[in-house]
Amino acid sequence: MGERDVLLRVRTAGFCGTDLSTFRGVNPLVSYPRIPGHELGCTIDAMGAAVPPKFRVGQSVLVHPYQNCGQCSACRQGRPNSCRDNQTLGVQRDGGMTEQLAIPFDKLYTSDKLSLREMALVEPLTIGCHAVTRGRVAAGDTVGVFGCGAIGIGVIAAAAAKGATVIAIEVADEKLALAQKVGAKHVINSAREELHGVLQQLTEREGPRVMIEAVGLPDTFRAAVEEVAFAGRVVYIGYSKQPVEYDTRHFVQRELDVLGSRNALPEDFRAVIAYLESGLLPVDDVITRTVSLDDAGAALADWDSRPGAICKIHVSL
């Protein structure tokens, strides 16, 4: 442990869609073996000599899990979240599904109001928060969101908090019910309803001004472009596992802004911490299951077998 490091005791670690992809063996960013875990609620066990006095032994903290190079074009533009050589805990490097972890103090956030399990929710919610910022969502916008897993829930919460009208699109009724609890005004089960017709009805035949994709399927990648309004904005968070074919007419005729969104910035972490401190998120509904470390593998296997029933799994260490 270096003089700027804080030795953490990991108390709660969340599983996300990235971990599920890793479990399935289809995550292109992961080499094996790999220790997962980047959604962390921790307490401080010890501190290096250069750690500032605002940190103290026993204090609860959460982790900013990204490590950037500081030299690539993204870093030089002040966008370290999209660093060419980004190293995320549990993805490109071993993560926090372990008893102790040494982290530089400038990668930690504190809150006197949040529980450890709320702290472990911050990072996944920041992904959606960052996507909303990328889409320049503002009060009065209509925002269509594909996917109501943990990342989509973060999108919905952040967009609703900005005063946007959110339309949640999913195939699982349980997740659509959760989307309504976190701020979606309208929900569409695209397995039962005709997506285009319902979106046209809800938007005065214009389409949503912003479409945010948090699924990662070719069909939803295309639909985001096909359904967005003229001069609209499309934001992609998901990774499609297969190539996606488009009718490029949509890009030109509608003069669309098509944006990628990766990871999150410190301001996203601060915004989500403030949001969670407000008590607006139905935490008990977002966290589907809490399991022990011994049961973590079985919980991932269960999530793999019935993904529509699970939003977030927490592992208590």
Image (tube, rainbow, N blue to C red):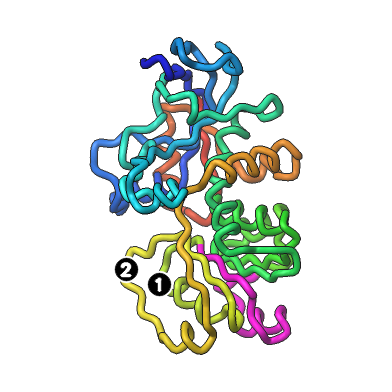
Q: In this view, does 281 lie to the left or right of 88?
A: right
Question: Which of the numbered marks, if any, corresponds to residue 185?
Answer: none
Question: Image quarter for residue 138?
Answer: bottom right
Question: Tag 2: residue type?
Answer: Gln
**Rendered location of residue 116, percent (x, y):** 60, 27
Taking 211 as reference, is 23 above or below it?
above
> SS for tag 2?
loop
Q: Distance between the residues labelled 2 and 1?
A: 7 Å
Taking 278 as reference, is 2 above or below it?
above
Residue lying at 37% horizontally and 65% vertically, measured from the top left: 240
**Rendered location of residue 212, percent (x, y):** 55, 65
CB under 8 Å between discs 2 and 1: yes
**Rendered location of residue 257, percent (x, y):** 51, 73
Question: Magenta residues?
Answer: 188-213
Split into 4 quadrants, where in the image is the N terminus? top left
Q: For residue 133: magenta? A: no
**Rendered location of residue 198, percent (x, y):** 66, 80
> SS for tag 1?
helix
Q: Name the residue under label 2.
A: 242
Q: For residue 211: magenta? A: yes
| Camera sees residue 65 | yes
